[in-house]
Image (cartoon, helix red, strand yellow):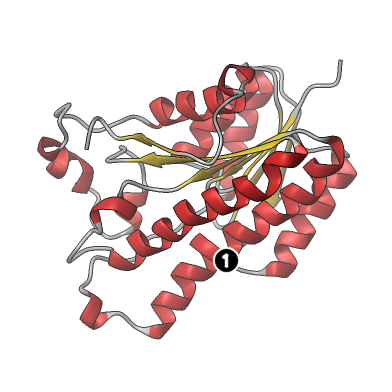
Amino acid sequence: MTRPVCLITGASAGIGAACAALAAAQGYDLALTYNSDAAGAKAAAQKAQAAGARTLVIKADVADPAQIDALYAALDAEYGQLDALINNAGIVGLPTRVADLTHERLRQMFDVNVIGAMLVAAGAVKRMEPHGKGTIINITSVAARIGSANQYVDYAASKAAMDTFTKGLSDEVVPAGLRVVGVAPGLIDTEIHAKGGDPDRAARLSSMVPMQRTGKPSEVAEAVLWLMSDSASYVTGSTIDVSGGR
């Protein structure tokens, strides 16, 4: 049998890399995208290959529609199918108040986290609908619910947009046999906090989590891969928190 193919955007580190490792272990071949961390993407691919997966690594900035088109052209040429998308690529800015946000920052945030993610999902739908099956997992954030005041309100707003998009897209494509689900991580111990200028943020805020600890990328990956499986065949249009109760 042909192994199913999963596209993971932003697969060079953190949740994306954890999803790649688990998807490979569960029998998927992979297309892995990255924007700047080529070494991380290569390491994720090598780990997946060690688990028996065929891998394709593609450099793609999802803020650029032409690069999205190019990544799908590469995927089509290599595999000719797409069974699952983990729509994970995203960015966060330095902590700031709304009064200090700039148009440039907002444009970049929404180009990557919302517009790019929506275009990637649209490309997946075009490849899945003719076959009457497929799963799209949008990685959102608990920030969409709590707002992230005085830190990342723009990031939180972008993830709230993805929660709405998840429901709307699900309703559009479920008649064709596709499922669309959101996964909203809470305080997860990944590199995104350092990229946002606060590497100790997760550990510092862990006391706010009812479980009194940060989460691991592998714990998010477990939820994602379950949602991609037939065991979750009656789950669509929802956004599921992986947040330790936060």
Which residue is label 1 attached to? 115
Q: Position of residue 48 (x, y in %)?
A: 63, 26
Quarter of the N terminus within the rendering = top right
- Determine whether the residue tagged by mark 1 lies in a helix, strand or loop: helix
Figure check: 84 above or below 108: above
Q: How many marks?
A: 1
The residue that appears at 30% across and 40% down in the rendered structure is 186
Figure check: 117 above or below 47: below
Figure check: 102 above or below 134: below
Q: Position of residue 111 (x, y in %)?
A: 53, 70
Q: Is residue 68 left or right of residue 139?
A: right
Q: Residues within 10 Å of mark 1 (few under 14, many from 20)?
A: many
The residue that appears at 74% across and 54% down in the rendered structure is 123
143 or 178: nearer the eye?
Answer: 178
Q: Is residue 116 left or right of residue 130?
A: left
**Looking at the image, which residue sits at the far left?**
207
The residue that appears at 82% across and 50% down in the rendered structure is 74
The residue that appears at 81% across and 46% down in the rendered structure is 127
Q: Quadrant of residue 242?
A: top left
Q: Amino acid at mark 1?
A: Ile
Q: Is residue 190 left or right of residue 244?
A: right
43 or 148: nearer the eye?
Answer: 148
Q: Position of residue 104 (x, y in %)?
A: 43, 82
178 or 109: nearer the eye?
Answer: 178
Q: Position of residue 119 (x, y in %)?
A: 66, 61
Quarter of the C terminus within the rendering = top left
Figure check: 107 above or below 236: below
